[in-house]
Structures are given as C-alpha cells and as structure tokens.
Image (tube, grey):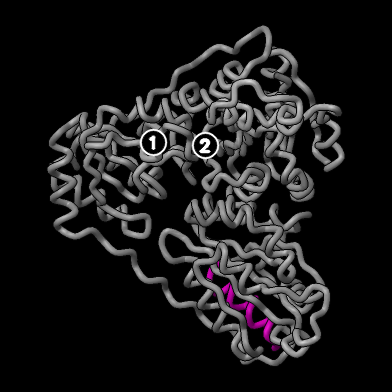
Amino acid sequence: MNGADSLVKTLLAGGIDVCFTNPGTSEMHFVAALDANDGMRCILGLHENVVTGAADGYGRMAGRPAATLLHTGPGLANGLSNLHNASKGGTGIVNIVGDHATYHLQYDAPLTADVAGIADAVSDWRRTSESSRHVAADGAAAITAARTHPGQIATLILPADTAWGPADGPVEPAMPPPPAVPGDAAIKAAVEALRRGSKTALFLGGPNLSGDRLEIAGRIAVHTGARLWSPMSNARTDRGAGRVTVERTPYPVDQALEALADFSDVVLVGAAAPVAFFAYPDKPSRLLPPDCRVHVLTTPTEDGAAALTRLAEAVGAMKSEPPLTQFEETGLPTGDLDIDKIAATVAALMPDEAIVIDESLTSGRNLDRLTANARPHSWLQICGGSIGIGPPLATGAAVACPARRVLALQSDGSGMYTLQALWTQARENLDVTTVIYSNRAYAILQMEMRGVGVEAPGPKARDMMELQRPDLDWVSLARGMGVEAARAETAEAFNDLLAVGLARRGPFLIEACL
C-alpha cells in the first residue's frame, strides 16, 4: 500500500465517498488510488472553482463533507473564490492538493508555489504531509477538522513522493469535538430580551434555519411575540408550505435600516449582528439601531440546537404550536416577461422539496417575498459575496440529493464565471433546471454606482457594467456544454419552458430575456 491508497481508504472510513476533481501530474498516484478503491464517486470539473463550489453545494445538502482534488498552488488558487464562499457559509470540505515531490521543490520548477500560503487564505486547518507513512493520519485529522461544527475548510497538501511511497494502512478519523453549549447567563439574558415581545428579534444563522431548530425557533416566536430574522445570505434555509417563515435582512442599506429600526433587542443564534455588505458615504455600517441591545445566545461555532431547546424550555414554549406557512395556489402570469413574473412562475411550478440555488442578485430582489408560500423547499444562497457560486452549487446539491429537483436562479454576468459547471451537469446527467436572468449587464454594479452617489456614469464606466457588443447567447453556450436550452421572451413562453425543464430528467437551461 502506498500513501495515496492509505489516504483514499481513510477518506472512505471517515464517511467521505464523493471527490470533486481537477487533477494534474502531481496527483496521478492519488488518481490511481481513487480508481483502485471501490466506493468513491469521482466527479470531474473543468475549472477548479467549479470543483470547490460543487463541494460546497454537496456539503450544504448532504450534511457531511466532500473531498476535492486540486493541482498544486495554481490549481488551488483557481478554486479560492468558492472556498471563500464555503468558509463564510460554514461548509466542511477536505481539499487534497498535490504538490511537487519534496526533493524536487529545491529546483523551482514552473509550478513550484507557496501552496501552504495560498491554502492559509481560506483554510481553517492546513497540513503538509511529511512522509508517505504520515499521509493516512494527516487525512484523518483533516476529516475531523472538516466535520467540526458547523463545518470547516481543511486542506491537506500531498507532495507527490508521499503519495507513491510506502504506507502502513488507513487511519480511522477521530470524532470532532462537540460544539459548546450556552451557559446559564446567556439563556437568562435571552429570556429577559424575549419578554419585550415584538421589540425583540431572534436572529438565526447557519444550521438553525433548517430542520427541528427552525421549528423550535417558531415555537419561541409564537409564544413570546418575538420576530424571527436571518442574515441577508444564508447557506441553507428550509422554507415554503409547512415551514416556519423567517424574515431576511434586505441588501440595500436604507431598506435594512428601516426594516430593523423598531428593535430594542436582538438575540443572536449562530449569526453575527447584521452589517452593511459594503461601506457607503454618509451611511452606517451597523444596521441595528444605535440603542439596540445585542445578546449572543450562541456564536456560529456553538450548539444552536441545544441553545434553542433550552431557551424554549425556559420561556415555556415547547408546547406552543409553531406558525407554519400555508401553501397558496397562484396563477401563471402572462404578457411581457419581467423579474416578478419569473418569481410568480417559480412559485407556482416549483415541485415539492425542490432545492433552489439563488444567485439571481439584483434580478431576484423580490424572489424571497413572492415565493414565501410556495411548496416546501430548501433555499441556498451565495454566502461570501464572491460571484460564480450558482452553477457549481447546483451541481453539488444535485449530487447530494438525487431524488430532489434542483432549480438554479442565475444572473447572467456571474454565471459566466463558472459556466463549465453545465458540462459536469450534462456528464453526470444531474436533474438541474437553470434559469438565466439575461439582462446583459452587471446590474448590481449599476446599482452600486448609484449607491455611492454616481448618478450619471460616463461611457467608459457603462462599458465596464454592460454585457453587450456582443450579447451573450446562453442557449448556444449551454448547448456547447451538452445541456439542452431554450430562450423565453414572454411570460407564456417562460411558463411552458419551466414546466418542461422541471419535468424532464437531466439538466435544462432557460434563457429568460429581460
């Protein structure tokens, strides 16, 4: 057995059976080990940012880490943007990054790089294997780190000679440490805040927006009169019919200040206090009222489930019925296509337990409100602000949950960052329906120009924010990646195409012309 074999067997022993890959020469022994060991599904991405983003989507929906295989420093660097997003979203990932053989580094070959320095920018845990007999133990430690609540980025650098050298066998990963539970003082402060009723927000983040935790939060809210809020962007929110509705912090600063203006107290459960996404002239960075009291029930690394249960018991809410959202049947829109009609069609046609990937950005500003009463679904958003997460996130989510339909709502500009994910969707025959908001612009940048006080940008500025001359042809781009696609210019056409896309097997793309 060599080091690469011992690592693959260690990954499988640690419950990691999916590896999103883009390998190179330094990783050939690891590739051979993946090939030789049954049980590991290997999925190729044509760009490393597709690989890392897919691992993020998989982790969010599977509830356990996937592995990635990346090629030396430049390959890791290509995947950093979506590792940044995964880190902000609390997703666990085990990165295996190949490197030159240890004795070859001294010659400064073209791909020689500071792999550790690049990894440190996004990794919660990082180690370089020093010998082939250490690889399995290093891999086990990486798995434990990735599984540490709520999820961490663990990067193992694998020099080529540690992959091909002799090894003793796999190592069983240790259980991660349990997350800390809140103390009595934190519970007492939260109870006192909740007595102020609607003046108090229970601010939920991370895994507290899904499953039993969300239901318990709903019991607390209905019993005390407090309101449930979440950050603007969340890794996963379970919503729709039969779920507890949580209000979301708006992106525009003025809207957020107005929405949060009445709160005297905010209780944080796995979330940070809300702040503006960017700084703007003459606008505050902190979105809560200046005199609002902030109480930390749990940080993102602490046990939100235990905290919410203890809090519900302390206020006597465990027997209260949570306020569940009711499904509302809506008709299909007609006429000229616009963003609200797209949202209305999505709400009407979304199947039960769909997974919605939201990188719609400015085009999706009303999606949250217009889909609140749709069928039950999970909503995944961009968490780190690094655009290009949507297509890879949809790919990973579809791998994790093959029985659920994935609906990706994607702005055209950010979709171009990771277009190659469509090829992986076609190759793996994944059930992903992608809607491209084709407004042929970086519309969010146009909005940001106005936000910083530039009302009349000149021709050079406009050229940097318009996706024209030539127009992007998403139908041709998708077909070039092996994905069937069609264009909708009216609401009626979009209604028909979305129904077709959601009903068929495999990937399908709709270019919605706005």
* Element on which disc 1 rests: loop
Nearer the observer, 23 or 117: 117
Assign the magenta stretch its main secondary structure: helix
Q: Which residues are magenta?
A: 1-15
Residue 412 spot, x, y in % from top left: 71, 32
Number of other residues with Cα within 10 Å of mark 1, as a class: few under 14, some 14 to 19, many 20 or more: some
The residues bearing labels 2 and 1 have C-alpha atoms spaced at a distance of 39 Å
Q: Does 411 lie within the magenta span?
A: no
Residue 102 screen position, x and y as percent: 72, 87
Which residue position holds label 2? Answer: 353
Question: Residue at 36% of width from left, 48% of height from top?
Answer: 272
Mark with earlier residue (2, 1): 1
Q: Disc 1 designates what residue? A: 284
Residue type at tag 1: Pro
Q: Amino acid at mark 2?
A: Glu
**Residue occupying image coordinates x 57% and y 17%:** 340
Q: Secondary structure at mark 2?
A: loop
Report if residue 501 is visible in the image. Answer: no
- For image coordinates 27% across by 32% down, the residue present is 227
One can see residue 38 in this view: yes
